[in-house]
Image: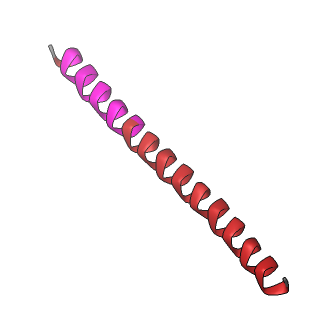
Amino acid sequence: MCVMDVFNRCLKWMYVMDGCLKWMFVMDICNIVVILINRFYSTVESRLKIK
């Protein structure tokens, strides 16, 4: 019973950590997309200003 209790806690902890890692991964992708969009707009703006 004690061993199973610890095992279940470890499983829950691993599940929570897995969810956090996936969320961090999604946030990283969102940040990269935002940076790319900002760079794209800044280059477009600079080209429009030159013209």
Quadrant the N terminus occupies = bottom right
Whether residue 35 is situated above or below residue 19 in the rendered picture: above
**Towards the viewer: 25 or 47:** 25
Q: Residue furthest front?
A: 1
Count of labels in the image: 0
Would you say the magenta stretch is mainly helix, strand or loop?
helix
Spot occupied by residue 2 in the image (x, y as percentages of width and height): 85, 85
Whether residue 46 is situated above or below residue 6 in the rendered picture: above
Q: Residue furthest bottom?
A: 3
Residue at the image position 81 percent from the left and 77 percent from the top: 5
In the image, 31: left or right of 1?
left
Q: Residue furthest left?
A: 51
Q: Is residue 40 magenta?
A: yes
**Towards the viewer: 28 or 50:** 28
The colour style of the image is secondary structure
The span picked out in magenta is: 34-49
Residue at the image position 70 percent from the left and 75 percent from the top: 10
In the image, 31: left or right of 36?
right
Quadrant the C terminus occupies = top left
In the image, 15: left or right of 5?
left
Spot occupied by residue 17 in the image (x, y as percentages of width and height): 63, 64
Spot occupied by residue 6 in the image (x, y as percentages of width and height): 78, 80
**Towards the viewer: 41 or 15:** 15
**Towards the viewer: 7 or 49:** 7
